[in-house]
């Protein structure tokens, strides 16, 4: 072969290799582009799908805000019609009261020890162990992880909650001390606060909402609204077993607690109770502390919207009404999305 021909052959082979490489790169780039376009399309679809779930959830929050009887929450409120309304978009909407249950982080041990609620514990544990667990390990937002070993299986999910405010009149005194310390970082102030709590307990004094700011003093901005003086459990949604045991708590001297419990369970099926009606049904009850437990307002809701395996949960808190406010406000405090 002549030198010129050999050189031309080498160039031709090099050009062919280069063309093949360019073709491979081109094919790879096209595949990558298609993959990126597919990912972008899926991302846009996922974002649009989540936005649809969020719109539906906020519609339910808006219905809660439009409640024509905002001082009481019950199964006859208009929001439930919105929840049950068939939807053309295929979404499933759920609403649940998540605060009308015994608060695992706040509940006083005597409430558990002096009623049949003591039977909810596992063998070898009890109210004292629950109180000590909180003192040793602090509070737990995941109540099953924090306290599940103390209770019989399934009990915490059924009768207890991790959502709810700490009513200064009903919360365990040591839990209040720890909460003060967590919110302020002031150990000396926490001990002084604990002493004042013990003082009102000894005097059997019940703080009113309008007295709270003066009682909390300089710590009020750090503690409110988590610490308040509002009845925490809505009798419209409270589990019948817990309702009956609270009414039967011996220190409150409720007359005919079984009959009172039956009255609540019957009335709440078809009508909405007011705070005044609640007190009329219960009647005389010792120092009236039961009215710090039982009320007609739901403080925390869970709004859930789902489609197949996709689900969005909002936890919505009702903020206690400030002194000069006409109505309390709702605030989304937790949002969880799974797909």
Image (spheres, rainbow, N blue to C red):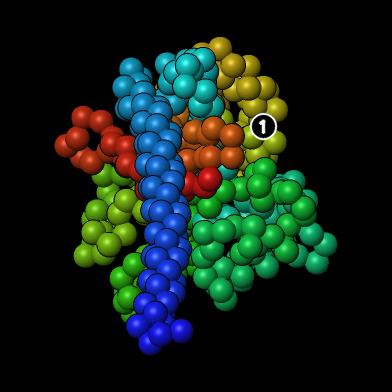
Q: Position of residue 72 (x, y in %)?
A: 41, 25
Disc tally is 1
Residue drawn at 69 percent across, 55 percent down: 113
The reply to whether residue 279 is visible in this rendering is no
Q: Where does residue 84 sit, x and y in percent of width and height?
A: 52, 18
- Name the residue that disc number 1 marks: 240
Q: Is residue 78 left or right of residue 96?
A: left
- Counting from the top left corner in percent of width and height, residue 192 is at 35, 73
Q: Residue furthest bottom?
A: 3
Residue furthest front as drawn: 2
CA neighbours of label 1 inside 10 A, class few (<14), some (14 to 19), many (20+): some
Quarter of the rendering containing residue 55: top left
On screen, residue 26 above or below 234: below
Whether residue 307 is situated above or below residue 338 in the rendered picture: above
Of all residues, the one furthest to the top in this rendering is 270
Residue at left offset 27%, top offset 49%? 211
Element assignment for label 1? helix
**Residue 139 can be seen in this image:** yes
Q: Is residue 212 above or below residue 64?
A: below
Q: Residue furthest left?
A: 324
Left or right? Give the position of 206 relative to 236.
left
Query: In percent of the image, x 36 and y 26: which residue is there?
Result: 59
The image quadrant of residue 236 is top right
Image coordinates of residue 338 in percent, x first then y, are: 52, 47
């Amino acid at each position: 072969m002549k030198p010129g021909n050999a050189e031309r052959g080498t160039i031709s082979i090099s050009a062919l290799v280069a063309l093949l490489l360019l073709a491979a790169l081109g094919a790879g780039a096209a595949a990558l582009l298609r993959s990126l376009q597919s990912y972008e399309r899926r991302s846009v679809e996922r974002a649009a799908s989540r936005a649809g779930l969020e719109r539906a959830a906020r519609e339910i929050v808006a219905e809660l805000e439009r409640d024509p009887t905002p001082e009481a929450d019950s199964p006859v409120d208009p929001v439930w019609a919105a929840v049950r309304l068939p939807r053309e978009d295929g979404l499933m909407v759920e609403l649940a009261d998540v605060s009308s249950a015994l608060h695992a982080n706040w509940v006083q041990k005597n409430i558990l020890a002096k009623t049949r609620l003591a039977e909810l514990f596992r063998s070898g544990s009890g109210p004292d162990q629950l109180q000590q667990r909180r003192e040793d390990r602090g509070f737990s937002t995941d109540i099953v992880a924090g306290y599940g070993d103390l209770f019989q299986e399934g009990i915490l999910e059924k009768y207890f909650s991790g959502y709810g405010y700490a009513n200064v009149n009903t919360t365990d005194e040591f839990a209040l001390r720890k909460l003060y310390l967590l919110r302020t970082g002031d150990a000396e102030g926490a001990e002084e606060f604990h002493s004042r709590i013990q003082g009102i307990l000894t005097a059997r004094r019940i703080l009113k909402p309008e007295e709270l700011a003066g009682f909390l003093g300089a710590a009020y901005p750090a503690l409110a609204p988590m610490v308040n003086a509002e009845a925490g459990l809505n009798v419209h949604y409270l589990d019948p077993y817990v309702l009956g045991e609270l009414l039967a708590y011996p220190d409150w001297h409720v007359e005919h607690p079984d009959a009172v419990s039956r009255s609540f369970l019957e009335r709440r099926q078809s009508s909405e109770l007011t705070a005044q009606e609640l007190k009329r049904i219960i009647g005389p009850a010792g120092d009236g502390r039961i009215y710090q437990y039982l009320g007609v307002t739901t403080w925390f809701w869970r709004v859930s919207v789902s489609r197949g395996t996709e689900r969005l949960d909002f936890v919505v808190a009702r903020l206690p009404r400030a002194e000069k406010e006409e109505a309390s406000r709702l605030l989304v405090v937790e949002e969880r999305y799974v797909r």
